[in-house]
Amino acid sequence: MSLDPEKVVINRAIYSNEYDILRELIKDIGSQDNAEEGYFYIDAGSTRVRSTGEVRVTRFSENIILWLSDCFNISNKDSIYMEGAFPGLIFEYYMFLYDLDIKGIKRFVCLTDMGLVDEVNSILFPEIFCETLEQAVFYFTNVANIETIIDVYEEDDRMDLL
């Protein structure tokens, strides 16, 4: 089965001598189970590729790409590129906007039957920074795949600055 070109992003323009290598790689990816459900970022490095072993492929679930596209109001291909080229940047960016109280970004906490315990035995619960409760619920249920959600609520832990 061939991959949908809308679900594949390559980090740079490809040289003519690399076409066969990347064609083979994409064919191999397309033959994997459930490949049609994934989104793929192909990092061909910054120099010419001589074999498929020099290429790094990252697979993303449909849910994370759809969530990022919705939060940033960008295309799915842009979301694949952002998360592939700069893993975690989107979350850090939204946390930064939240800390500075920019763009209406809120902090949402997911209350579960089991919190995470940190080094000093404090119980922590998953959090996400986004604009709406709907985005937060989608993230916790479909991206983070948390099964035992008790509640998702907005919590502002910023200190008021004078």
Image: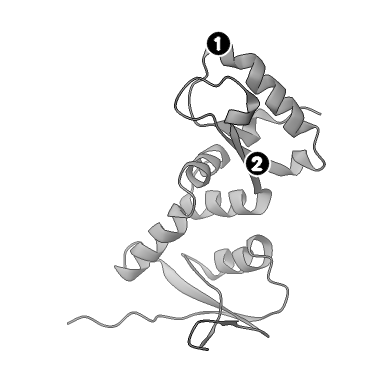
Residue nearest the observer in this picture, 13 or 108: 13
Residue at the image point whose x is 41% and y is 60% from the top: 92
In percent of width and height, residue 88 lies at 48, 55
* Left or right: residue 126 compared with residue 148: left
Extreme residue in the left direction:
162
* Left or right: residue 132 compared with residue 57: left
Residue at the image point whose x is 59% and y is 31% from the top: 55
SS assignment at label 2? strand
Based on the displayed image, in which of its 4 quarters is residue 141 positioned?
Answer: bottom right
SS assignment at label 1? helix
Q: Earlier in the sequence, mark 2 or mark 1?
A: 1
In percent of width and height, residue 129 lies at 46, 67
Above or below, 159 relative to 2: below
In percent of width and height, residue 99 lies at 33, 70
Image quadrant holding the N terminus, namely top right
Task: Estimate how packed mark 2 is, as few (under 14), some (14 to 19) or many (20 or more) residues with alpha carbons within 10 Å.
Answer: many
Residue marked by disc 1: 16
* Left or right: residue 106 compared with residue 33: left
* Disc number lying in front (2 or 1): 1
Label placed on residue 38: none
In percent of width and height, residue 123 lies at 54, 87
Residue marked by disc 2: 39
Q: Amino acid at mark 1?
A: Ser
Above or below, 53 relative to 48: below
